[in-house]
Amino acid sequence: MNLSLLESLKQWTNCTQFQIIYDTRVEEFTIQQIQRILYGKDNIVLLIQTVENDLFGTYHSQIPTKRIVQQPQQFSNWVGKSDENIFLFSLNNHNSPNTPLKFLSKALTETCLCLNTNESHFEIVLWISYCINLLKPLNSSKSFVFPSIKDYFYVNSPDDLLGKPNFMSTFIPKRFLILQGN
């Protein structure tokens, strides 16, 4: 990632530096591995690079602890903690010269990163509030951006992140990183 893109992230998050705490080039791409790294962290950037070199992701000011996630749930195995500081961003969009772009969450929506209570979902690695699903394996076209993203964030459509009109808004993730800011 070039330095100007990193500067945009620093400005948007008020962090002075970032450390890579997870990289699919080094570590296994599983829900267990990713959740183990995320539990209880703050100032987290989830960064997705596609095979078309689109670069987008989310910022989370807080991630639930493992203890909170593993408490019994009534309706779902996916648990999230509303994060009023969450935002989406597009650092590189192969169809838009206007990147980097930041997309704030809409008021009164409970936007968050959701973690799975039993860490054993067969396919979904990350789920972000009816907005983005990141599925395994890498280099598969299964991952997608929900059309409902515009109900949760100030985006026109999934194309703002992916750079292509696509009915299903699918993308092929090539690399996934987790950065922690301070």
Image (spheres, helix red, strand yellow):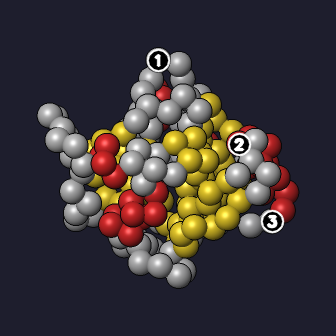
Helix, strand or loop for disc 3:
loop
Measured in 3D between alpha carbons, the distance from the residue under mark 1 to the one under mark 2, in whole angstroms, is 21 Å
Q: Tag 1's secondary structure?
A: loop
Q: Taking 62 as reference, is 141 left or right?
A: left
Q: Identify the image quadrant of residue 139.
A: bottom left
- The answer to whether residue 99 shows anywhere in this view is no
Q: Nearer the viewer, residue 163 or 175?
A: 175
Residue most toward the top? Answer: 108
- Determine which quarter of the picture holds residue 68: top left
Of pointers 1 and 2, the one earlier in the residue sequence: 2
Answer yes or no: do the residues labelled 1 and 2 have beta carbons within 8 Å?
no
Where is mark 3, residue-wise? 2
Q: Secondary structure at mark 2?
A: helix
Can you say whether 84 is above or below 64 in the image?
above
Q: Kindly identify the amino acid type of the residue bearing the numbered disc 2.
A: Thr
Instruction: List the single residue furthest toward the bottom.
Output: 26
Furthest toward the right, the residue is: 4
Mark 1 → mark 3, Cα distance in angstroms: 35 Å
Q: Label 3: few (<14), some or many (≥20) within 10 Å?
A: few
Residue 12 can be seen, yes or no: yes
Q: Could you say where residue 18 lies in the image, as x and y percent from the top left? A: 71, 59
| Amino acid of disc 3 | Asn
Q: Is residue 165 left or right of residue 131?
A: right
**In this rendering, would 139 be left or right of 3?**
left
